[in-house]
Image: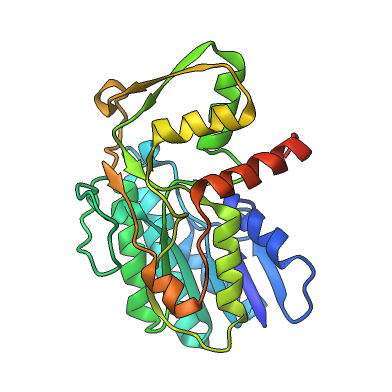
Amino acid sequence: MKIVITGGTGQLGSELKDVFGDQIGHEVTFLDRSDLDLSKPEEISGKLMAINPDAIVHAGAYTAVDQAEGERELADRINHMATHAIAEFAKKTSAKLIYISTDYVFQGNVDEALKEDYPTNPINVYGETKRMGELAALGQVKDAIIIRTSWVYSVYGKNFVKTMLDLMRSLPEINVVANQIGSPTYAYDLAILIKRIVDLDLWVGGVYHYSNEGRISWYDFAIAIRDLSGLACRVNPIDSSGFPTAAKRPGFSLLDKGKVKSVFGIEVPFWKDSLIQMLNKIAQNPLT
């Protein structure tokens, strides 16, 4: 199968490179910003046509959540209009489409693991534009697969885990929000799921939720990062009101994974097990 993956140098794209490797049976093309500028939707169809993929994993996105509040038009072009252009191409060429979305499509005020059909109501520009991307994908490609995920981290790129490690190594104490609840997603685990979907003979379109198992706060996550890394930094729990941001954040980001486990026959790793795996990789290759 000939596969195109957007966001090729991002966290998920980089993990997908590791997961697919040089596997026989798939010809995978990873496109980064220099190959496919998602801020120019009008150029997307021509560039994809030159590759003519059988499947597209659209992992590229505008993910600067706070910055998006002041760059609504740019965020919309990348997260919404570019997705619409990719979906139009997929419809025209009968290519399969996987679109990576976010828990931020929800308001985040319900303390329970949300199923895929729970009403969306984003509270920031990033969430709004990703939701419009979902609708664009499903509106064009009836069997598109939408995967919503949360709190993504990886050995690659910038993310909460690597930021915490840097801060804890340089400061005697830090403050971390304790009243935002969810479950992190190790991008490697998500990459494994995507590869399984691509490898399956049966393609089951629809919306799916995926994150690691468990329920924690950002504070709990930071404590685990510190303790597993053997660091001595003091971590203080604070309310989100004490850490104001340009974009509102959901209070709850819990996702129900029952559907994705049932349909694709996967086991979802527990969050701490995946964190240990990621930290071990960093220890083996600290320059990642």
**Residue 285 visible from this viewpoint:** no
Q: Is residue 55 visible?
A: yes
Residue drawn at (38%, 73%), measured in percent from left and top? 259
Q: Quadrant of residue 120?
A: bottom left
Q: Position of residue 231 (x, y in %)?
A: 61, 21
Judged left or right of residue 104, residue 39 is: right
Q: Position of residue 253 (x, y in %)?
A: 32, 49
Residue 98: image x %, image y %? 49, 72
Please state, as top left, top right, bottom left or bottom right, where the C terminus lies in the image.
top right
Pick the quarter of the image with the N terminus: bottom right
Residue 185 versus residue 33: which sits nearer the camera? 185
- Nearest the camera: 192 or 26? 192
Relative to 57, 254 lies left or right = left
Residue plotted at (52% across, 81% down):
96
> In screen coordinates, is 249 left or right of 266?
left
- Give the total number of marks visible in the rendering: 0
- Extreme top residue here? 172
Residue 35 vertical position relative to residue 265 in the rendered view, above or below: above
165 over 97 or under it: above or below: above
Q: Residue at x 60, y 24 (%)?
A: 166
Asked if residue 223 lies left or right of residue 287, the reply is: left
Colour scheme: rainbow
> Observer-nearest residue: 47 or 10?
10
Picture coordinates of residue 105, whole percent (x, y) = 29, 56
Above or below, 279 against 233 in this view is below
Relative height, residue 201 to residue 219 (above, below) = below
Q: Quadrant of residue 136?
A: bottom left
